[in-house]
Image: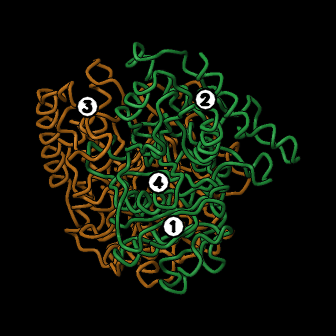
Chain colours: A orange, B green
């Protein structure tokens, strides 16, 4: 066990940095639900249960030069790429300083040019061809850039998924397609979404590798995505990685998952929660002890408190700005 | 000045822009080795190579979606949709993504992207190779929609579209491709997006049109001129943004306005132009605004007679001009 991360070339420090992002994502997310139930923010869509897959993937990329095209659950990915709890809470409150959209979009529609996080929309899968375009353009410019694009298994039924994979595969573009399969498209289970055992099976139809990995196993995901990134950088083309994750919350704050899944099922999902699993690994491998993790949690909670207070008091966008930036302004 | 066809002007603009700026590239079905099914991109792959003249898989949403992604990285893609009729699978990419990118990211990201789409009928293309789809897009803020009628404007407007930092839909009328010729300067010039052009000076009635029907209107204007009716003809050139000042000025000039387009009438560009005139120039009018457009049927049929009865022909326009002049 001790050697698992070392075999992947990760230091204890790397692991603590990864754990910190996971924990931050979780604590920010939990705070969002509290704020929503208190009537302070209108909407939450959650990353809980996906943090391990997201951190494993994000840390396998070069966070100084690669591009990410995240979907709405990728809280840990955008944190790993430079956004802060303050940014996320500003977005939740739709304040002027929200770096994604200045309060125009719903929360979790991420985007920030300076962090190479490409702006996203609500119709699913539209970002998949964009990732192919980013990778194509980077290659035309001679830049060593990999594009990471993520989506749920529900999105893998859209035309843009198939068109995007096919385009990237034909042109052997440096893209990592990252499916976070939590078993549900809102309430529709995978048995009604896919006729194949897994989304990764679809990769064969495009002549690219398809890999399934346990999304609660941070190091397993890191390894799978790292392999895909190296293949992309070598010029060998894209890979479809499917992380089997759990969704520990309803789809969103407007959803009630008790209408379509049992208590037992959710309890089983909680047993697969990546956060305690990774904490356990850190302790068992001697990277951290319980006191270190407790202290880290205090630190993260304080950061989230500060972000909450800041975002609540931040200014709203100027109403006159509703008309701005439809086109380039002179 | 050389006389060129409409489609040669398309090709000249593409070639010159690709020579000028290495971030310009084209992609679409058959644009490479074949040079386009209409031959608009012929010769480009020989000059610029397959990296900048991409034969894309037959998948319109990916053609536009990939172009959007490349534009976000700082390239200037020109995507070709083989026929405007086939743009519909890409509408989500155009309207949900390209049109909203700047707005939704609060000016952080934007799409310098051109989508070229041959449209229109009268070429025996039947229902799915004849449609005019410009009204679907002229409704959408965030897009620019251009529909030139002359080779001069094609070259100048396509260059403007490529240099524009926002997504531009560039509609080329198929019937114009080889039937419309005109003088085109060899040198670099641009025609600004958003400005209409007076195609013919006149004093009795005002005719507003764009694309192929602009030429049909000019033909009818020459016919009624013999009868002493002087038609003032305005070529819109750009549908979004509409050149409001030019439309109002043209309406004011004669007080009698007719709008002509090949697209069907309900909810078409003509409806917007006439509403604009009603809002802002009502007291300039001496007659109700008249609209001449395609009929309310799904699309243009294949049979020659059926196709002809769809089209707004010069005799029909001339008759309407007489009626308007008499009012």
- For label 3, the residue is A94
- For label 1, the residue is B9
Give the mark nearer the N terminus: 2 vs 3.
3
* Crowdedness near tag 3: few (<14), some (14–19) or many (≥20) residues, C-alpha within 10 Å: many
Give the mark nearer the N terminus: 4 vs 2.
4
* Crowdedness near tag 4: few (<14), some (14–19) or many (≥20) residues, C-alpha within 10 Å: many
Q: How far separated are the C-alphas under marks 4 and 1?
A: 34 Å
B253 to B216, vertically: above or below: above
Q: How far separated are the C-alphas under marks 2 and 1?
A: 60 Å
* Residue contact between numbered discs 3 and 1, judged by CB atoms under 8 Å: no
Q: Position of residue A71 (x, y in %)?
A: 42, 49
User: How many marks overall?
Assistant: 4
The nearer-to-camera label among 3 and 1 is 1
Specify the label residue A127 is tagged with: 4
| Quadrant assignment, res B268 | top right
Query: Left of B255 or right of it: where is B218?
Result: right
Give the mark nearer the N terminus: 3 vs 4.
3
Q: Position of residue B132 (x, y in %)?
A: 64, 43
A69 to B239, vertically: above or below: below
* Protein chain holding label 2: A
* Protein chain holding label 4: A
Q: How far separated are the C-alphas under marks 4 and 2?
A: 29 Å
- For label 2, the residue is A260
Query: Left of A326 or right of it: where is B306?
Result: right
* Protein chain holding label 1: B
Q: How far separated are the C-alphas under marks 2 and 3?
A: 31 Å
* Residue contact between numbered discs 2 and 1, judged by CB atoms under 8 Å: no
Quadrant of the image containing the C terminus of chain B:
top right
* Residue contact between numbered discs 4 and 1, judged by CB atoms under 8 Å: no
Mark 2 secondary-structure assignment? loop
């Amino acid at each position: 066990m001790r050697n698992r991360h070392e075999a992947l070339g990760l230091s204890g420090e790397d692991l603590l940095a990864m754990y910190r992002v996971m924990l931050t994502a979780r604590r920010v997310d939990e705070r969002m639900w509290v704020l929503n139930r208190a009537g302070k923010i209108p909407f939450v869509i959650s990353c809980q249960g996906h943090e391990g897959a997201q951190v494993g993937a994000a840390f396998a990329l070069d966070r100084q030069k690669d591009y990410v095209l995240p979907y709405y659950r990728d809280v840990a990915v955008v944190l790993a790429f430079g956004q802060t709890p303050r940014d996320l809470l500003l977005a939740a409150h739709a304040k002027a300083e929200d770096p994604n959209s200045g309060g125009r979009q719903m929360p979790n529609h991420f985007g920030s040019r300076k962090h190479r996080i490409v702006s996203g929309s609500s119709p699913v899968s539209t970002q998949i061809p964009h990732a192919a375009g980013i990778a194509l353009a980077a290659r035309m410019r001679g830049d060593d850039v990999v594009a990471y694009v993520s989506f749920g298994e529900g999105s893998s039924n859209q035309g843009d998924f198939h068109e995007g994979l096919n385009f990237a595969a034909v042109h052997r573009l440096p893209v990592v397609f990252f499916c976070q399969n939590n078993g549900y498209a809102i309430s529709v289970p995978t048995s009604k979404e896919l006729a194949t055992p897994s989304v990764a099976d679809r990769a064969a139809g495009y002549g690219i590798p398809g890999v399934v990995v346990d999304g609660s196993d941070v190091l397993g995901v890191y390894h799978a995505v790292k392999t895909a990134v190296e293949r992309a950088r070598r010029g060998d083309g894209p890979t479809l990685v499917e992380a089997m994750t759990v969704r520990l919350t309803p789809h969103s704050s407007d959803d009630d998952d008790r209408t379509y899944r049992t208590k037992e099922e959710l309890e089983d999902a909680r047993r697969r929660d990546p956060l305690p699993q990774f904490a356990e690994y850190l302790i068992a491998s001697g990277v951290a002890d319980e006191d270190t993790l407790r202290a880290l949690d205090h630190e993260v909670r304080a950061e989230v408190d500060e972000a909450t207070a800041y975002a609540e008091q931040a200014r709203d966008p100027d109403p006159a700005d509703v008309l701005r930036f439809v086109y380039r302004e002179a | 000045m050389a006389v060129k066809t409409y489609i040669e002007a398309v090709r000249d603009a593409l070639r010159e822009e690709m020579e000028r700026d290495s971030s310009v590239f084209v992609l679409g079905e058959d644009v490479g080795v074949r040079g386009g099914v209409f031959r608009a991109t012929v010769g480009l792959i020989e000059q610029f190579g397959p990296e900048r003249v991409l034969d894309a898989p037959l998948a319109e949403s990916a053609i536009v979606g990939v172009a959007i992604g490349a534009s976000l990285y700082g390239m200037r893609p020109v995507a070709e949709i083989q026929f405007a009729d086939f743009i519909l699978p890409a509408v989500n990419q155009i309207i949900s993504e390209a049109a909203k990118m700047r707005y939704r990211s609060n000016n952080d990201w934007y799409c310098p992207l051109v989508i070229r789409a041959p449209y229109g009928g009268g070429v025996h293309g039947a229902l799915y190779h004849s449609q005019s789809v410009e009204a679907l897009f002229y409704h959408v803020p965030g897009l620019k929609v251009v529909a030139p009628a002359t080779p001069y404007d094609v070259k100048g407007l396509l260059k403007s579209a490529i240099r524009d930092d926002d997504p531009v839909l560039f509609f080329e009328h198929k019937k114009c491709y080889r039937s419309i010729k005109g003088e085109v300067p060899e040198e670099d010039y641009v025609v600004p997006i958003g400005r209409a052009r007076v195609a013919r000076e006149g004093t009795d009635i005002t005719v507003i049109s764009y694309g192929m029907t602009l030429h049909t209107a000019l033909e009818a204007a020459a016919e009624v001129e013999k009868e002493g009716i002087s038609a003032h003809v305005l070529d819109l050139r750009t549908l979004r943004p509409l050149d409001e000042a030019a439309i109002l000025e043209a309406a004011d000039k004669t007080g009698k306005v007719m709008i002509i387009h090949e697209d069907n009438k309900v909810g078409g560009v003509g409806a917007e132009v006439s509403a604009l005139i009603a809002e802002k120039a009502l007291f300039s009018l001496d007659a109700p605004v008249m609209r001449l457009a395609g009929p309310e049927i799904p699309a243009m049929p294949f049979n020659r007679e059926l196709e002809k009865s769809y089209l707004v022909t010069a005799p029909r326009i001339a008759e309407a001009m007489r009626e308007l002049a008499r009012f």
